Amino acid sequence: MENHDEKRVSREEIIRRLNAAEELIGVAEAGSDPAEAERQRKLKNEIEKEQEINRGWFAQHFGAGG
């Protein structure tokens, strides 16, 4: 039974380390290209503007409840 617990703890430790490594990689990737982050931010803003325009158009043509 003790061997089973050791394996479980070992697996849990491996999973914790892998998760930590993935988080570090994600942070490094996100911070590695500020131009890409800016592009993503601008794209999101454009999408939000387009959605607001569409909401206004639908409200004018189909009533505010739409």
Image: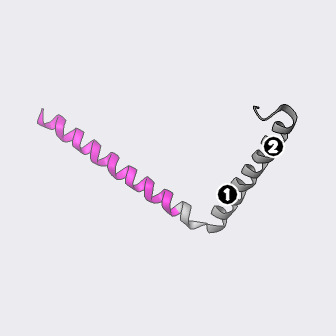
Residue depicted at 49% across the width and 60% down the height: 27
Q: Is residue 20 above or below residue 51?
A: below
> What's under tag 1, amino acid-wise?
Gln
Q: Is residue 8 above or below residue 44?
A: above
Relative horizontal placement of residue 30, taking residue 6 as reference (left or right): right
- What kind of secondary structure does the magenta stretch mostly adopt? helix
> What span is in magenta?
1-28
Residue depicted at 66% across the width and 62% down the height: 36
Residue 65 percent across, percent down from the top left: 75, 32
Residue where numbered disc 1 is placed: 40
> What's under tag 2, amino acid-wise?
Gly
Residue 61 percent across, percent down from the top left: 87, 35
- Is label 1 in a helix, a strand or a loop? helix
Residue 47 percent across, percent down from the top left: 74, 50
Residue 17 percent across, percent down from the top left: 34, 52
Q: Kindly give the residue lying farthest to the left in the view shown.
A: 2
* Residues under numbered marks 2 and 1 in contact, where contact means CB atoms less than 8 Å apart: no
The quadrant the C terminus occupies is top right
